[in-house]
Image (spheres, rainbow, N blue to C red):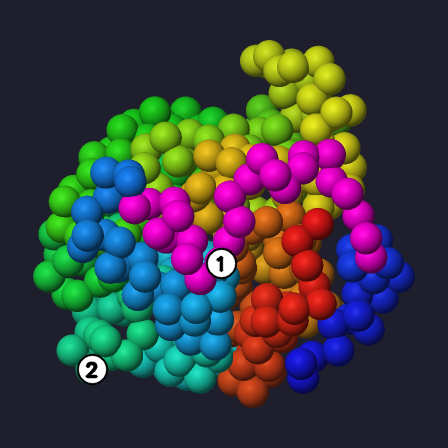
Amino acid sequence: MSTDIRSLLWDEKEMLLDTYIPKIPKSLLTLPGADFIDRTFLYSDRSPQVLKSLRNIYSHGRLAGTGYLSILPVDQGIEHTANASFTPNPEYFDPENIIKLAIDGGCNAVATTFGAFASVSRKYVGKIPFIVKINHNEQMQYPNIPHQIMFWSVEEAWRLGATAVGATVYFGSPLSRDEISEIARAFERAHELGMATVLWCYLRNDGFKKDGVNYETATDLVSQANHLGVTIKADIIKQKMSETNNGFANIGFWKEWKDVFEKHIGNHPIDMTRYQVLNCYAGKIGLINSGGESKWEGDLAQAVRTAVINKRAWGHGLISGRKAFQKSREEWVKLLHAIQDVYLDESITIA
């Protein structure tokens, strides 16, 4: 492989790459692989058209046929403002350059907004699978509240030629029950039309922040969000990588098995991510993690680290995009290829 993965992991290379036996044995989980869709969905209620859409996503780009995914998501112009996202490289105000970046980067798919997709759909449908994001948290309401609103219809995504629809639910937010119900209905309609479904399972609640710790990325909380996501029939779950534990106990609500962290999670990042996988119907629904927040420095190492953890935990890949717009096209393609090299490297095995 062209990427020197071990050198990018610095002093964590032994912890992340050497032999490690996670608390949750891999015998309990469904293995990613070229035949993953046949082994997992063939006897489900997913129609042949939905299976075709899923195969289209898993069979594109540099990771085609591996069972792993590298997806470029570009809804930042809404979620983080176009100013903050695109101004460092103004070429990305033009949606076509975003699609070109995903193609040049060897991605399985590109996830983007209705407007961006509609502006280029006739030119690029069939050249790369499109995941159309159907809801967003727009940034113009002040003060901003954590609430995803529908921007257009599932039918319009289908008419434009989308392979899948994507949506976000802010689990734990005051309006989360409305979002769950709305997206469950939208996913049902997407499946009726033959499209796959991808759910961003995020947590949003100021009450999840306590004593200086943000438990919105706590393993137990995000894993429960994953479990709710697969319950409303997401075909792929997108989740942030866990950064802490004991969310339920430290916040002081809900209940969990008293020995869960000692026996099944622990503090090793592979264990924390594997518990996320376990909550995605024991790996029958693919888990993709985000590539980490943009730090301006060390992004390549951070992305590779996240990919190694995801792969060894039995995840399905990364969906990474926020870093793209502060970098040149060459730098970003290099970063995407480095992520993909982790999944193509047979020496990096599932723990």
Name the amino acid, label 2: Lys
Q: Are marks 1 and 2 in contact (CB under 8 Å)?
A: no
Secondary structure, mark 1, is loop
Q: How far from the left and from the top, in percent, is residue 69? A: 47, 62
Mark carried by residue 279: none
| 17 left or right of 195 in image | right
**Residue at 67% from the left image edge and 84% from the top image edge:** 2
Name the amino acid, label 1: Gly
Is residue 31 found inside the magenta-colored segment of the image?
Answer: yes
Work out whether 52 lies above or below 201: below
Circle 2 crowding by C-alpha within 10 Å: few under 14, some 14–19, many from 20: few
Please name which of the two marks, 1 or 2, marks the residue nearer to the observer: 1
**Residue at 78% from the left image edge and 37% from the top image edge:** 267
Quadrant position of residue 117: bottom left
Q: Earlier in the sequence, mark 1 or mark 2?
A: 1
Label 2 sits on residue: 123
Q: Is residue 125 visible?
A: yes
Label 1 sits on residue: 33
Q: How far from the left and from the top, in percent, is residue 305? A: 71, 61
Q: Nearer the viewer, residue 35 or 173?
A: 35
Q: Nearer the viewer, residue 136 or 111?
A: 111
Q: Nearer the viewer, residue 39 or 270?
A: 39
Give the extent of the magenta segment.
18-42
Q: How far from the left and from the top, in percent, is residue 282? A: 51, 36
Q: How far from the left and from the top, in percent, is residue 213? A: 72, 33
Secondary structure, mark 2, is helix
